[in-house]
Image (cartoon, coloured by chain):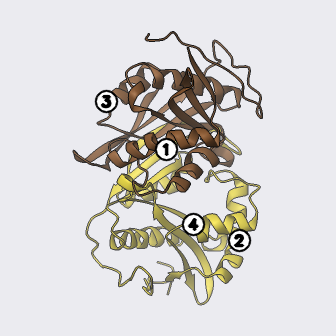
Chain colours: A yellow, B brown
Amino acid sequence: MIHIRPMTPADFEHFWPTFQAIVAARETYAFDPAMSQEQARQLWLELPLHTLVAEEDGQLLGSYYLKANAAGPGSHVSNCAYMVCEGARGRGVARLMCEHSQRLAHEQGFLAMQFNSVVASNEVAVALWHALGFETVGRLPHAYRHARLGLVDCLVMYKWLEQPQQPLLIGRKNIEAIVSRKRGR
Amino acid sequence: MIHIRPMTPADFEHFWPTFQAIVAARETYAFDPAMSQEQARQLWLELPLHTLVAEEDGQLLGSYYLKANAAGPGSHVSNCAYMVCEGARGRGVARLMCEHSQRLAHEQGFLAMQFNSVVASNEVAVALWHALGFETVGRLPHAYRHARLGLVDCLVMYKWLEQPQQPLLIGRKNIEAIVSRKRGR
């Protein structure tokens, strides 16, 4: 059973190799590949509103963060980033985290969720976000220097959040929700 | 003659009422209207790669900043924000600053410029950016809570930067370029 719970500093230590490998690959994230572990910890764990992990039997499968995409008059739009550990791919962990993040965002009072820069060549991610109700609302020509493909477009994806079917029992300060999903599904 | 030069900490003191009024109006910027002067100084003067002012006869007309819009594989795309002081509106100061910023961005090695969130109801700005070669590449439904109009859309605008006609003689560490423009034009 996969659980989603807040990330601890100790979790980040375990997550760091995944973060480092994904950023170093330069295929999906516009983060600095030379970023230190401490900078990554700031970006992923400290600055966001919430950072969570997906785990199963004590094994880390992935992580995501939720934050406001803008301030003041734009603060009702949320933003998330998701990373899945290499050994856990193809099991629906990203889908599970995205579904969880939408419910969490709604509970935190956000009205929409925006992905600012989905690399267009990342077809698996684009298809998944579409399947989860996100629309491609923008296309940024040649906005990403892909390690293998050179300059590729990025997509802006956006979803207005509806009332969740299964609300999370999550307080602003005390996230204890657990989302479960059958193994291997 | 309007000069564009780097902003000093003393300039920011003079700019602060303009910043505060524009943010408090909640019509154009997704910044927190309750932001302190020190937070605004960080956002506008400290964090960007460059912050400049437009002035004439020692009087501040406006300011803009230039920064990378993303890191790593997205670091070739720049981002700017512009504010014009109330008494200086309608004189082409925003146009002048945007033209200047494109040349500066090009000289700093950026290949494109992106505006992440142009409030769609800000028709003067949208028309100006279009006139200066920016394309609307995205539309974010209801992404801005406008003080008078309620939820309005935001536009994502983007321009691939060409070789500038009049290159600025600007070093990375030592901006001394002056752009002039006839008064009242």
A39 or A154, nearer to the observer = A39
Question: Are the residues tagged 1 and 2 within 8 Å (C-beta)?
Answer: no
Instruction: Pinpoint the chain carrying mark 2.
Output: A
Amino acid type shown at disc 4: Leu
Mark 1 lies on a secondary structure that is helix
Same subunit, labels 1 and 4: the answer reads no
Examine the rendered structure and indicate whether residue B26 appears above or below residue A132. Answer: above
* Nearest-to-viewer mark from 2 and 4: 4
What is the distance, in whole Å, between disc 2 and disc 4 at their CAs?
16 Å
What is the distance, in whole Å, between disc 1 and disc 2 at their CAs?
40 Å
Same subunit, labels 4 and 3: the answer reads no
Amino acid type shown at disc 3: Glu
> Which dot marks residue A62?
none
Instruction: Pinpoint the chain carrying mark 3.
Output: B
Number of marks in picture:
4
Quarter containing the N terminus of chain B: top right
**Residue at the disc numbered 1:** B16
**Residue at the disc numbered 3:** B123
Question: Looking at the image, which residue sits at the far left?
Answer: B149
